[in-house]
Image: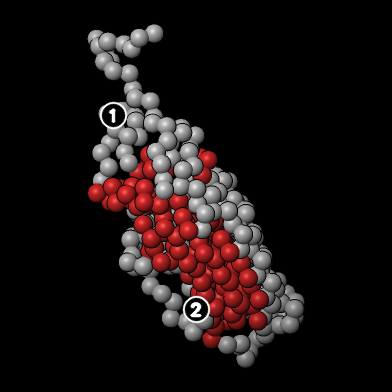
């Protein structure tokens, strides 16, 4: 596999540097990158009708280029006829990878922005204009990068994830806008039932994730812009409310007061109970039950609770307290 990777790297370098002037490839011949070649051999697309095939894991040169931030090279491969809708064994397409790069993954190593003239957002636009399908879904959980920070993170980005869901998780409003303009559907969930509008409210993400930045000063503005595009496209603001997994619940969990107000202005149900009968106000006011009794709300939770009350939120049905006494104690009346 190492020699295959070297051969592919040499292929990409040669393509980027220009077409060789000697020993052209026979017209229409295929390079099978799933075969182990001599590390010193350079393969390049020179002849008309030439097509680059996938390697053993289905990774095409275009997917490889975009994944590594070589967007100028990706544009070159597209001009040479690369298939923009080929996916690898995990279901990742060039478009999915371009969206993934637009909110640069972080954690565990310095991930530097590409210095190419073609930006990741421009790459998304080029792919969409070339006919890339915006509604493909991941077939498997993508492989982790070779950094410890990735392990166990980004659980949302699993089977069924679309480019739009990936953009929504990253609160990537510019990518969301482009995708929706080119036919992306906001109603395709992943295998866990997560929809883009829910992800854009912060639901299902955590600080340890490497896809998305949730502690920046502009995080609420990015969330609002993302939600606005999705809601204008027809997404339901109350999606997931019945299970306590709505965009509103996500914003409450993060303590995003501006996002809570925005969602309320768009018709979010402030009193929708979850499966336990708890409303959003209950969830942020403590009293969640469980072992050890009710937890006291933090100052931030108190602020969100006060905001919800000003907006008209009401408490629901409290979670039943655990029986008192335990071993040797009194049991409640039968």
Determine which of the numbered discs, if any, sits on residue 293 in the image: 1
Relative side of 96 to 209, left or right? right
Q: How far is the residue under mark 1 from the one under mark 2?
A: 52 Å
What residue do we see at 28% from left, 18% from top? Answer: 324
Determine which of the numbered discs, if any, sits on residue 280 in the image: none
Q: Position of residue 58 (x, y in %)?
A: 62, 60
Label whose residue precedes the other's in the sequence (1 or 2): 2
Front-most of residues 17 and 23: 17
Asked whether residue 9 appears in the rendered view, the answer is no
Residue underneath mark 2: 119
User: Badge 2: few (under 14), some or many (20 or more) residues near its Cα, within 10 Å?
Assistant: some
Front-most of residues 47 and 311: 311
Q: Is residue 146 above or below residue 274?
A: below
Asked whether residue 260 appears in the rendered view, the answer is yes
Q: Is residue 48 above or below residue 142?
A: below
Q: Position of residue 314 (x, y in %)?
A: 41, 41
Q: Position of residue 60 (x, y in %)?
A: 61, 67
User: Badge 1: few (under 14), some or many (20 or more) residues near its Cα, within 10 Å?
Assistant: few
Q: Quadrant of the C terminus?
A: top left
Question: Which of labels 1 and 2 is toward the front?
Answer: 1
């Amino acid at each position: 596999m190492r020699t295959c990777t070297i051969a592919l790297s040499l292929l990409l370098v040669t393509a980027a540097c220009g077409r060789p002037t000697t020993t052209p490839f026979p017209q229409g011949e295929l390079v099978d990158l799933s075969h182990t070649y001599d590390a010193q051999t350079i393969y390049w697309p020179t002849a008309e009708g030439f097509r680059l095939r996938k390697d053993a894991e289905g990774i095409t040169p275009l997917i490889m280029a975009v994944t590594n931030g070589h967007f100028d090279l990706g544009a070159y491969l597209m001009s040479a006829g690369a298939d923009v809708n080929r996916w690898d064994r995990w279901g990742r397409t060039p478009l999915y990878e371009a969206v993934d790069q637009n909110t640069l993954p972080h954690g565990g190593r310095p991930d530097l922005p590409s210095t190419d003239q073609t930006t990741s957002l421009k790459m998304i636009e080029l792919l969409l204009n070339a006919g890339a399908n915006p509604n493909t879904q991941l077939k498997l959980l993508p492989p982790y990068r070779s950094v410890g920070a990735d392990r166990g993170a980004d659980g949302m980005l699993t089977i069924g994830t679309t480019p739009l869901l990936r953009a929504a998780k990253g609160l990537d409003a510019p990518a969301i806008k482009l995708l929706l303009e080119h036919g992306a559907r906001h109603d395709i969930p992943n295998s866990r039932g997560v929809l883009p509008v829910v992800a854009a409210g912060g639901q299902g993400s955590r600080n340890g994730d490497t896809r998305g930045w949730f502690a920046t000063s502009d995080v609420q503005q990015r969330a609002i812009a993302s939600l606005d595009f999705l809601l204008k496209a027809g997404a339901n603001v109350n999606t997931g409310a019945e299970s306590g997994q709505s965009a509103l619940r996500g914003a409450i969990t993060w303590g995003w007061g501006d996002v809570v107000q925005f969602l309320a202005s768009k018709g979010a149900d402030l009193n929708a109970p979850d499966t336990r009968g708890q409303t959003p106000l209950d969830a942020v006011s403590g009293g969640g039950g469980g072992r050890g009794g009710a937890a006291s709300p933090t100052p931030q939770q108190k602020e969100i609770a006060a905001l919800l009350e000003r907006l008209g939120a009401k408490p629901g049905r409290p979670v039943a307290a655990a029986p008192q006494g335990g071993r040797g104690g009194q049991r409640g009346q039968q």
